[in-house]
Amino acid sequence: MIKVREHVMRNDTNTHKPQDSYLVVGGSGFLGNHIAETLHKRGDTVFVTDLVQRHSNAIEFHSADLTDKDALHALIAKLKPSCVIHTASPIHGLSQDIYQAVNVDGTANLLEASRTNNVRKFIFTSSAGTVYDGGDLIDVDERCPYPTKAMDAYNQTKADAEKLVLNANNDDEGAMRTCAIRPAGIFGPGDRQVLAGLIKVVENNQTKYQIGNNENLFDWTYVHNVVHAHLLAAEKLFNAPVDPSIFTENIGFVDPTQNDIKVPTSRSRNVGPHPTRDVTGDEKQSALMYNKGVKESKPLVRTKFDQFIDPSKPEIASALKVSGNAFFITNGEPIYFWDFPRAVWKGIGHIPPQPTVFSSSLGYFLGAAAEVFAWFSGREAGFTRYRVNYASSYRFFNIEKARRVLGYEPVVGLEEGIQNTLDWYKSTQIKS
């Protein structure tokens, strides 16, 4: 079995030899800042561009707007980066016009400026939501097509931008190569969306409500794992296609960074995604103890190995290289949707009562009613049909392509990631 620590070592600052100069677009954002800081700490030349500067003065910052084509050309011509990492995107809940202007038109502007100024590598932060239409996504891989109708404007424009990026890939000598990273449910220190939303639910005394039966598995991804995937993509963008034999080899399950990781859950369960073995007596006893209030949960059952291609058609593998491809990136540890927020709430000292459970169909009706009321009152709806779908749909992804082509393995396990995030949150509360 591949060990995660082996993958961690490849980005060790003591052994890394800088090969590229990087421009992180959206570097003041949550993910962009983590990428820029990681590059800076390991000794790479890195520049950051965004609308405003929010972080370290140690990294050279340049203000630029993705909608300003001339400014982008001038900036890239001046800095001459060999690799552009494009993480910029508006937050959820804004208008179609904003998403179109930034996600689609802005990405087109950045691609043109990069290509014109001889950028060799272009890494795009896409989203696992590019294939989401509101239905269940169960262990899907990159063969899943874009939906005919996306769930919302954000996911639609991210998909449109991803298409632009992948179509811009050119494997000719001296041309710019591109790829897309599709993270699912990013969280971690510095997060101002997921964590803030969960804290707000506590403040509004809404943890007593649950939409759906909490049988739906969901992927969350710790931010450092997403950073790791971006840096692997930059490292391997010019690699030759992988040998087809890699897709016939079982490289084992995803290894957590803790020896016996146990994801804290509100309800222990005897099944997980695609169990490959019978549940042991120890696990049954662990689940029983947990339900009786003993603070122990059963080990997570991980997504099973899935052979990515048909070995009888090896020609498919010729397209399986980094350049021109998209990759789902997750922790490889899907859990039941409501277990994640309850783990966070527990970590901040809030134990919610036994929840009042609303079916997803009732929740959808209530969400539609709330949207109508918000429209008439001129307010933003706090409860929507999208949020009902989000909380009650299966959304977990197969990362075997990333493991084999990128060499990706999660470097931080889910429980450790939750604890790191809570430690950061508590430290910010003390400082404030």
Image (cartoon, rainbow, N blue to C red):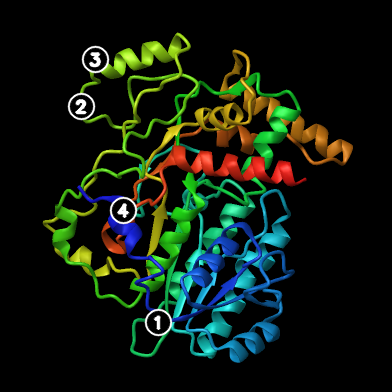
Q: Tell me how far mark 1 sits from mark 4, CA to CA.
A: 23 Å
Q: Disc 3 residue type?
A: Gly
Position of 66 with respect to 219 (left or right) is: right
204 is higher (above) or lower (below) than 91: above
Inter-mark Cα distance, 3 to 4: 30 Å
Question: Does residue 176 sit above or below 304 in this rendering?
Answer: below
Q: Alpha-carbon neighbours of circle 2 within 10 Å: few (<14), some, or many (≥20)?
A: few
Residue where numbered disc 2 is placed: 277
Labels 3 and 4: the sequence-earlier one: 4
Q: For mark 1, does the 10 Å Cα neighbourhood hold few (<14), some (14 to 19), or many (20 or more) residues?
A: few
Residue 401 seen by the camera? no
Q: Nearer the viewer, mark 2 or mark 3?
A: 3
* Element class at badge 3: helix
Q: Residues within 10 Å of mark 4 (few under 14, many from 20)?
A: some
Q: Of the residues shown, which amino acid type is indicated by label 2?
A: Arg
* Foreground residue among 71 and 147: 71
x, y percent for residue 50 = 68, 71
Q: Residue at x 38, y 70 (%)?
A: 14
- Quadrant in the rendering for residue 382: top right
Q: Which disc is residue 281 wearing? A: 3
Q: Look at the numbered disc 2 and give the secondary structure of its residue.
A: loop
Q: Quadrant of residue 139?
A: top left
